[in-house]
Image (cartoon, helix red, strand yellow):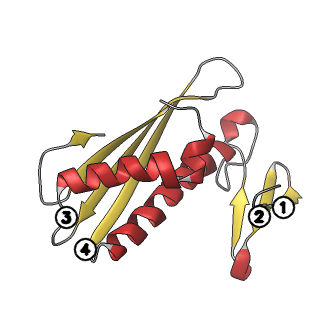
């Protein structure tokens, strides 16, 4: 028995630029950087992979915090992907920094939550090789940084 199916489609705009359409009329421009022969007008495919990971993780974290009745005041994610020198230049390490602020948020709870979301709930993380992703949790009110 097959599971859920996800589909995507792109329309060529010209040169190396494509446009993706999403639900609700949203659109997204995709292009490659000038160094790769593109116009650099939209997101590159490799940037989209990082954005997909960040959005999958963050949406799930926000949903779980809401179920825990914890107040989230701020949540910013910074993602940095290091790539191989050899073509096709896959990611060799991805660092995801979660910066959160809110009443009742604690580092131990957030670190457990981020680890659980990656391991059990984030489809994008599950699609990537194990050990590729490293998470860092930063409470905006603290100076200390902790890796998960």
Residue 85: % across, % down: 60, 18
Q: Nearer the viewer, residue 78 or 73?
A: 73
Q: Secondary structure at mark 3?
A: loop
Q: Residues within 10 Å of mark 4 (few under 14, many from 20)?
A: some
Q: Residue at x 49, y 50 (%)?
A: 120
| Of labels 3 and 2, the one closer to you | 3
Q: Is residue 43 left or right of residue 25?
A: left
Say the numbered circle drawn on residue 70: 4
Q: Residues within 10 Å of mark 2 (few under 14, many from 20)?
A: some
Contact between labelled residues 1 and 2, with CB atoms less than 8 Å apart: yes
Q: Is residue 55 above or below residue 82?
A: below
User: Residue furthest toward the front?
Assistant: 1
Q: Residue at x 23, y 56 (%)?
A: 109
Residue 131: % across, % down: 47, 30
- Which one is earlier in the sequence, the residue at label 2 or at label 4? 2
Q: Secondary structure at mark 4?
A: loop
User: Residue furthest toward the bottom?
Assistant: 24
Task: Write down the residue under mark 2.
Answer: 20
Task: Write down the residue under mark 3.
Answer: 105
- Which one is earlier in the sequence, the residue at label 1 or at label 4? 1
Location of residue 95 by image quarter: top left
Q: Is residue 102 above or below residue 85?
A: below
User: Residue furthest toward the top?
Assistant: 86
Contact between labelled residues 4 and 3, with CB atoms less than 8 Å apart: yes
Task: Write down the residue under mark 1.
Answer: 9
């Amino acid at each position: 028995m097959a599971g859920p199916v996800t589909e995507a489609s792109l329309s060529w705009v010209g040169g190396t630029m494509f446009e993706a359409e999403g639900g609700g009329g949203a659109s997204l421009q995709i292009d490659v950087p000038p160094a790769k022969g593109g116009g650099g007008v939209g997101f590159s495919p490799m940037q989209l992979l990082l954005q997909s990971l960040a959005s999958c993780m963050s949406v799930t974290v926000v949903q779980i915090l809401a179920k825990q009745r914890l107040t989230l005041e701020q949540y910013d994610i910074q993602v940095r992907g290091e790539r191989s020198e050899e073509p096709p230049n896959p990611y060799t390490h991805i660092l995801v920094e979660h910066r959160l602020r809110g009443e009742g948020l604690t580092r131990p709870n957030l670190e457990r939550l981020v680890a659980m979301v990656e391991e059990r709930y984030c489809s994008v993380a599950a699609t990537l090789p194990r050990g590729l992703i490293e998470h860092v949790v930063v409470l905006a009110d603290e100076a200390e940084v902790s890796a998960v």
